[in-house]
Amino acid sequence: MVSLDESLIARLKKGKNHFEVFVDPDGAFAFKRGDNLNIEDIIAVESVFYDARQGDHVAESVLQSTFETTDVMEIAKQIILHGEIQLTKEQRKHILEEKTRQVISIIAQNAMNPQTRTPHPPARIERAMEEAKVHIDPLKAVDEQVTIVMKAIRPIIPIRFEEVDIVVKIPSDYASKAYGEISKFGTLLKNEWQNDGSWVAVVKIPAGLQNDFYGLVNHLTKGDAETKLL
């Protein structure tokens, strides 16, 4: 179960009563849109309430007559799927800030300026979002909102999702160690060991991670490597 401090309230009205459960925000939203999650991983308290914040529990007889079961997990599923999820002002602000950071991070890591073939810094993406007046919805999935934001900011800045291929040649002194780190960073399209012990590879990576990749290569080789963007 999730922490009560980080939970919020899902509420469903049936007849004259409101029924409430404490839920994990991200898990509840994902479950509501159809993701295959265990309800036990979403519920913070294994109880159903009339008023969750007041701790006003619903009697089993009322649960049975209303939901035809007293199984809290089954009832919680119905509340999440058919009810609404209540966000406090603070929770809404926190989720909004976190999802905004996630959207910007995903775009910065995977997109580039097709005119210069260089990444867009997160600050530039954020400014473009502000200029485009595109707003993040705290109740929608991050992936869905990445698509919405990309469409909104394209008239503001040249941007598209793309991968790039980079040739890298690692001197023999660093080749063995660098092989493992670089292999994990991207997809190896070419992988050749040279007679002098050096290693040459063509690595495919998200366009927005070019600077991170160059930084890794320089760190692994103390700046003694060759790279070329194809």
Image: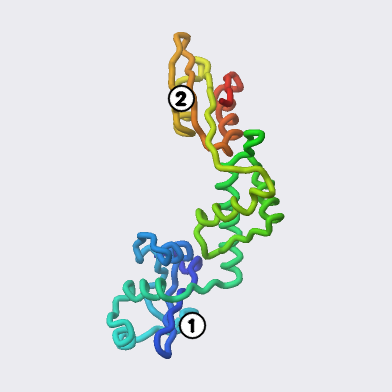
**Which x, y percent locates residue 77?**
36, 71
**Which x, y percent locates residue 71?**
29, 76
> In the figure, 217 relative to 77: above or below?
above
* Name of the residue lying farthest toward the front: 155
Q: Residue 152's mark?
A: none
Q: Is residue 25 left or right of residue 103?
A: left
Q: How packed is label 2: few (under 14 Cα within 10 Å), some, or many (20 or more)?
A: some
The color scheme shown is rainbow
> In the figure, 195 relative to 112: above or below?
above
As helix, strand or loop, the secondary structure at mark 2 comes to helix
**What residue is pinned by disc 2?**
179
Residue at 60% across, 54% down: 149
> In the figure, 130 relative to 76: above or below?
above
Q: How packed is label 1: few (under 14 Cα within 10 Å), some, or many (20 or more)?
A: few
Name which quarter of the figure residue 211 lies in: top right
> In the figure, 171 relative to 101: above or below?
above
How many angstroms separate mark 1 from mark 2 (CA)? 58 Å
> Identity of the amino acid at label 2?
Tyr
> Identity of the amino acid at label 1?
Gln
Residue at 61% across, 39% down: 112
**What residue is pinned by disc 1?**
54
Residue at 66% across, 34% down: 116
Name the quarter where the C terminus is drawn. top right
Name the quarter where the N terminus is drawn. bottom left
**Which x, y percent locates residue 9?**
48, 74
